[in-house]
Image (cartoon, grey):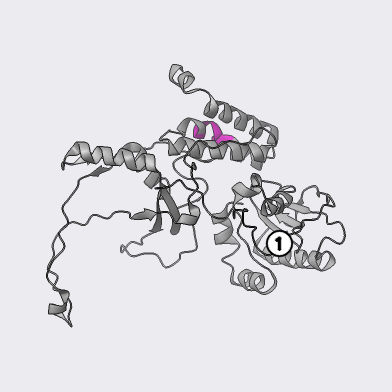
Amino acid sequence: MFAGAAREVVFSNPEVVRRVNEAFIPVALKAALVNNPPPGVEGAVYAEIGRSKPAPQGICTTNSAGKVLAWALSFDDDKSILEFLDHVSDRYRQSPDAANPVTAERFMNFPSRKLRDVEDTGKRISVPERHANDDRCPAIPTIERGTLVGRIIGRALDEDGQPVADTIRQEHYMEARFEVPVVLQEQLAAAVNQAAGKQFQIPSEFARGLITHAFLGQLDVNPMGSVPGSRNDSRQWEFTGQTVPSNLSTESDARHLMAGHPIDLTCNVRYGLVAETGSPDEIVEGAGADVTLPGPGTLPAKIQRLQLGIQRLQKSGGDPSEIAKLMKNFGPLMQKQQVNQAESLVDQALKLLEEPDQEKQDR
């Protein structure tokens, strides 16, 4: 299930939180790594978990050996969430490790809609206590040198213009990391230099990189249309900028203690975003180059391939709106379990995404 949906429905329930903290070790995994496991021992654990997944995302419980006990994509009602915790606790007591084969149970809705079980491969994974010296942790983001990394926080406002008290629901609160690649910084710098101090239009690709994350709602299906299932009726934005001289006071604030410095101000306010260069442990030389996409295979692998391709398209300033229009029926088809028709849409989207640029221009 979408991470935002799980946060607001499942993990905002106080009793669920108490039970999980008491009897489980909660871990948030990146869906991209579950669907496309990295190399190394940690990748082997991802692969074992992903082997039985009924969908690209969901709630999964495993035993101490990384063997899946049960997957759940949804629940019949709120009470069923607690029943699911009871169910997997019982299964854990029966299979706490890999001493005996462990069958992975899967539920479209727990407990009413059970899917086919997935048998154990019998393969054991030896998980070390820490990463080897040459084994990079896949949880650390990978960025090219010079990338700016920032953080966006959004709050919904009530009728009085004050932030709403409830920050659990997706439409009330958002928090996201954003990156500004070097190529977009260069485009902005060129626009600033050309403007020579006058007002100028922010390059569209730079603006897109900022607003892609700045919205409230379903985090994985955003208004920019970058994920299968999202839809837009129209999109339009225009950002302008202008360089202004720094106007910091040279007078010592110590002259105005204890009241601090005086403020007498009447003006409009302009807010901006601040980002800093990524930390050294995130930087990988050549990370800005084109991503090598996984080859064709199962539907989850194709979806991951499509998502990575769209990310690459956006980073280069491309527009994924045609792909979004094509994929608007993907979600409804999956809900009806019409997997073949849904996979056909993904195949068409991949063909549209990966066709040569000249062919796109000729169409």
Q: Residue furthest top?
A: 362
Say whether residue 320 is magenta: no
Does residue 283 appear left or right of residue 130 in this picture? left
Q: Residue furthest front?
A: 133
Say whether residue 325 is magenta: yes
Q: Where in the figure is residue 92, as x and y percent of width and height? A: 79, 66
253 w.r.t. 167: above or below: below
Q: Which residue is mark 1?
A: 128
Report which quarter residue 208 is drawn in.
top left
Q: Main secondary structure of the magenta part?
A: helix
Answer few, some or many: residues within 10 Å of disc 1's Cα (few below 14, many 20 plus, some between 14 and 19): few
Report which quarter residue 344 is drawn in.
top right
Amino acid, disc 1: Pro
Give 327 or 187, whichever is nearer the viewer.
187
Residue span colored magenta? 324-329
Give 116 or 140, whichever is nearer the viewer.
140
